[in-house]
Image (tube, rainbow, N blue to C red):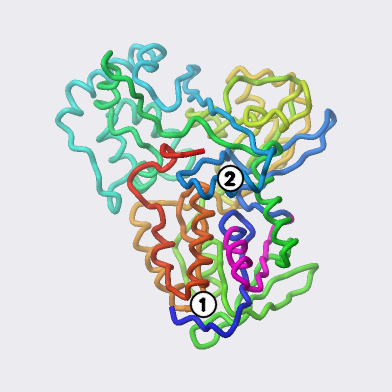
Amino acid sequence: MELSKKGHRVAVLGAGPSGLMAAWELQKAGFLVTVIEADERVGGLAATHVFEGKGGTYRFDFGGHRFITHNPELLVFIEELMEDDLLHSIRSSVIRYRDRTYDYPLALGNILKNAPWSLLAGVAKDLLFVLPFTKAVDDRESASFADWIESRFGTTLYRHFFEGYTGKLWGIDPKDLSADWAAQRISLIDLKEVARRLLPRSSDTPRTYARSYRYPKYGFGAIFDRLKERLEANGATILLNAPVTGVRTEKGQIKSVSFKQQGQVEALETDYVVSTLPMPLMMSFLGEQSELKFRALRFLNMPMNMENISTNTWQYLSDPDILATRLQEPRRRSPFMAPDGKTSMMLEIPCWKGDEIWSMEDHRLFERAKQDMNRLGVNMNKATGECFSSYAEFAYPLMSKGYQSERNKNAECLNQYNNLVMCGRQGTFRYIFTDTAMEMGQLAARSLIDQQDYRKRIFEFRNEKTVIETQSVA
């Protein structure tokens, strides 16, 4: 990496989980750390919004976060950081599809109990006459999501439970989506294995998630609010409402970072840069082109004049004509997310920045959402009428077929700057859990502390073919 040892100034770009953990490790090692964040709060995609409604204080996360990890040391760090404000919670999720409710993850016994006969006939045909003679697709480089799923679960389950939902989430045909998405998110081996585990002798049930998890009393973002307080108390500088506007380079190094604050563009001289900014954005700052894209999310947050919507943490909404992909009830994670006797609802709506859904006024989107919720049996007469939206422009790295080669080109280009380390979901263009993002930040810090080039390790960090979530110790 050939990093200079004479300077100790580090600019950390982005105050999400990865950036703040990098800042924490670097500060402990004696570096002078400045964190530059575009938003008004820390936490990035793991932040929590506070809404003062007619009935009291409501809290809404950016999406459905839970703290799960395979790393005991990281769990201890979070427990010590949050002390008594860290709760134990149990996740309960279901799939809603064509006016029926199914267990999540899909379980063959539950499908047999709840599915219409036409669907069951198709599943039986696939299980008996197709899948035994079909080789499971394992090529994550060139295969599609559709190939991966159909070779394991058959055409019937693919078309009913995967095709429409996945197309809605990503905005592209699942045949154009990389098999990487399936390999990283679905740990069930195949339909034959699911059927085998239904036999009386079998006591294990395959899952794609850890049911038990830790969650902060006042929202997931409280972890990063607390970490910010600790960093500032120890001397770190954290600049909020300060979007990065560019960098100045010289002889293969980044010499300064420009950012805008209170209408003025300022420059911060630095010796090292740890960036969690989206990879294509960082490429543009360096005068390079990138074909990588992100899928955006809009969250519609609504207080409700009722104690519970359901017993579920969230509900996957598989019907393609329903706008949202998930209905979430924050109170299911912590009772402190809504006032006593009340609850709230968050709809997770995929879109593209600037499209009709992204740009629609809140009241119009609320009226549109009411139709979907009434269809799902949610009593929208209990809605207070209040609502607000939060936006994530860079929510999901778009893993279209062949994206790996473009990602590799981007990484090679960025790695030419020997005092730049990229990390985090957006900085490495990876769909990862929060604990992995935090560990990436730690590894980025170690790269500078140890004066060793760990960038390739960071780029592929925890990229195993198994779903890490199932191994949580939290």
Image quadrant containing the N terminus: bottom left
Label 1 crowd bin: few (<14), some (14–19), many (20+), radius 10 Å: many
Q: Identify the amino acid type marked 2.
A: Leu
Q: Is residue 63 visible?
A: yes
- Pick the front one: 76 or 231: 76
- In the rendered image, residue 25 lying in the magenta stretch gets the answer yes
Q: Residue furthest bottom?
A: 251
Q: Residue sitting at 56 percent across and 66 percent down?
A: 275
Q: Vertical placement of 43 versus 152: above or below?
A: below
Q: Identify the amino acid type marked 1.
A: Asn
Q: Vertical placement of 412 versus 61: above or below?
A: below
- Disc 2 target residue: 297
Q: Residue furthest left?
A: 133
> Nearer the N terminus, badge 2 or badge 1?
2
Q: CA distance from mark 2 to mark 1?
A: 32 Å
Choose mark 2 or mark 1, whichever is in front: 1
- Disc 1 target residue: 419
Q: Vertical placement of 36 versus 84: above or below?
A: below
**Number of marks present in the image shown:** 2
Label 2 crowd bin: few (<14), some (14–19), many (20+), radius 10 Å: many
Element under disc 2: strand
Q: Are marks 2 and 1 in contact (CB under 8 Å)?
A: no
Give how far across and how far down residue 277 sits, in percent.
57, 63
Q: Residue sitting at 39 percent across and 58 percent down?
A: 460
Please state the extent of the stretch shown in magenta in the rendering: 21-40
Q: Which mark is residue 127?
A: none
- In the rendered image, residue 299 lying in the magenta stretch gets the answer no
Give how far across and how far down residue 244 sits, in percent.
65, 68
Give how far across and how far down residue 468 sits, in percent.
41, 43
Left or right: 469 as drawn, with respect to 324:
left
Q: Residue sitting at 68 percent across and 36 percent down?
A: 365
Give how far across and how far down residue 136 sits, in percent.
22, 38
